[in-house]
Image (spheres, rainbow, N blue to C red):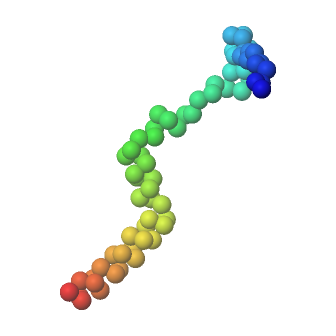
Amino acid sequence: MTEPQQQIKGLSGDEVLQSRAKYAPNSLAHQDKNTFLTSLIEMVKEPMFLKTKMELESLLPKMLRKL
């Protein structure tokens, strides 16, 4: 048994312009600044990353003394 096909109708050009005027364009502003370097910097600034880094730095001298 097959489903009846429905005709899909999109917005007309005028409807698109009205929608953009009312709701703003459908785009993400952060895409321009989202680079690998920006992501890396944001990750390093995370509190959990900093806490782990500080804990490792405090453990490192203890580990080296045991060698």
**Rendering coords of residue 34 (x, y %):** 46, 40
Q: Is residue 57 visible?
A: yes
Q: Pick whichever, 15 or 4, lies toward us.
A: 4
- From this view, report whether residue 66 is shown above or below residue 56: below
Residue 60 in which image quadrant: bottom left
**Rendering coords of residue 5 (x, y %):** 76, 19
- Residue that appears at 37% across and 46% down: 37
Report the number of discs.
0
- From this view, report whether residue 8 is shown above or below residue 34: above
Q: Is residue 18 visible?
A: no
Question: Looking at the rendering, in which quadrant would you find the C terminus?
Answer: bottom left
**Rendering coords of residue 14 (x, y %):** 72, 10
- From this view, report whether residue 24 is shown above or below residue 58: above
- From this view, report whether residue 63 is shown above or below residue 17: below
Q: Pick whichever, 32 or 66, lies toward us.
A: 66
Question: Looking at the rendering, in which quadrant would you find the N terminus?
Answer: top right
56 sits to left or right of 42:
left
30 sits to left or right of 24:
left
- Residue that appears at 44% across and 56% down: 43
Q: Residue furthest bottom?
A: 66
Q: Pick whichever, 46 or 15, lies toward us.
A: 15
8 sits to left or right of 53:
right
